[in-house]
Image (cartoon, rainbow, N blue to C red):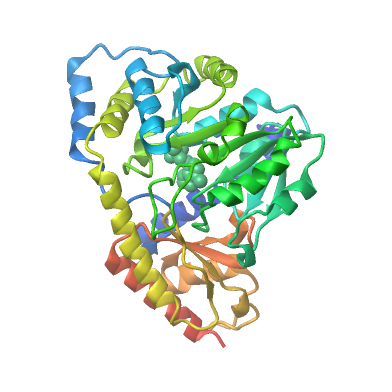
Amino acid sequence: MDFENRRAAGIKSSPSMAIAMAAKKLAAEGHDIIDLSLGEPDFEPPAHVAEAAIAAIRKGGIRYGAPAGMDSLRQAIVQKFKRENGLDYATGDVMVANGAKQILFDIFLATLEPGDEVIIPTPCWVSYGDIVSLHGGRPVYVSCGADTGFKMSAEQLEAVMTPKTRWLMLNSPSNPTGAIYSSEEYRRLAEVLARHTQVLIVSDEIYEHVLLNDTPFVSFVQACPDLKERTLIVNGVSKAYAMTGWRLGYAAGPTALISTLNKIQSQSVSCVSAVAQAAALAALTGDQSFVAEGARRFAGRARIMVDRLSLLDDLDFIAPDGAFYAFIGVGRLFGRKTLNGGVIEDDTGFAAHLLHAFGLSSVPGAAFGAPGFIRLSIAASECELEDACDRLAAMIQSLK
Ligand code: PLP
């Protein structure tokens, strides 16, 4: 019996989730594992967030709500865009969903016709390509190397534009590279986009607040206001407020697109949990010092990784500007022999050996469309990061 149609068969489970599960299993079996595969803050949300959720439960009356989200939360999101990004949206231009990931899912469900193309600069987050494929779209990957800071140039964008291009997916700060586009870099892309009026832009700004040095964050719409009517900004509380498991993302964009997304939401998940919405409202309207404090912590951890990794031979490593990952080139170690007689053929083999022989879980670059790299999350304690660097160093030293 076949339980998959062509679209489901054409995608894979999230590789980072799969690796995290494998690492958890090894740890449960008693192995000494440091798991740096998943990207989530390792601290709790601010106390007032949990209290708002508990108060919502105590108050009761938790029923189905509006597909777009509670009015109060949507207003708070409108205020967030005004306060932090200098952008004006009306309440009807914003919506709430079960994580930023669900919004990405819904926009392609809503807009793609079979064979429509979606331009995805790589390295990119593991889920982008499969979400596009699942909805009958064709991901068009554009490889952006370390020489351009892992960012796409206007020339690269122009070269892949076709009449079938429907979306461009941008993600700054980037998972996995930590690259941040400047206003100037965005404007150069905008000049190309101005000539291709059928193309919509999704700007995934989920790591907006995870800034690791002085490189400023700029929202795509802030940099390119002329493209506001063709751009959907996707964001959420997962990374900024350490609320990954609460599942709350939000989007702002053209009213007509938001209303289509709400229609889909009404026929799929109905609405987001009212408890999570109450918590997100508290996060967005309460004391914001937690957000800067989180960034400060991650910046300290990034410094540990930069200091330690720069001492290791044979790695290629660019310090990240944002997000919470170290994206490390390991290609120079391919072809070397392991102590048990194997050969490191590629990044998948490298990550497998690092996990099974040295107890350090990473995600191979192939999962991000960038073979030759591994990604380590820096969302772990300073102690774990030091230990992780020791294990990576031990593995490199063991290769002959
Ligand atoms: N976008 C990027 C680039 C991510 O790295 C992630 C999570 O890792 C998400 C979106 C998903 O965010 P959410 O938890 O809001 O679904």
Question: Which residue lies at the image location 33% right of the left edge and 12% below the top edge?
Answer: 63
In the displayed image of the protein, which residue is found farthest to the right?
Answer: 163
Question: Which residue lies at the image location 70% right of the left edge and 34% below the top edge?
Answer: 7
- The reply, left or right, for residue 255 in relation to residue 378 is right
**Is residue 248 in view?**
no
Rendering coords of residue 192 (x, y %): 72, 43
Quadrant in the picture for residue 147: bottom right
> Above or below — where is 301 with respect to 284?
below
Question: Which residue lies at the image location 59% right of the left edge and 55% below the top edge?
Answer: 367
> Above or below — where is 208 with respect to 212?
above
- The reply, left or right, for residue 337 in relation to residue 99 is right
Quadrant in the picture for residue 61: top left
> Above or below — where is 10 with respect to 367?
above
Rendering coords of residue 175 (x, y %): 51, 52
Question: Which residue lies at the image location 76% right of the left edge and 37% below the top edge?
Answer: 195
Rendering coords of residue 400 (x, y %): 57, 88
Quadrant in the picture for residue 211: bottom left
Rendering coords of residue 260 (x, y %): 58, 17
**Is residue 378 in view?**
yes
Which quarter of the image is occupied by the N terminus?
top right
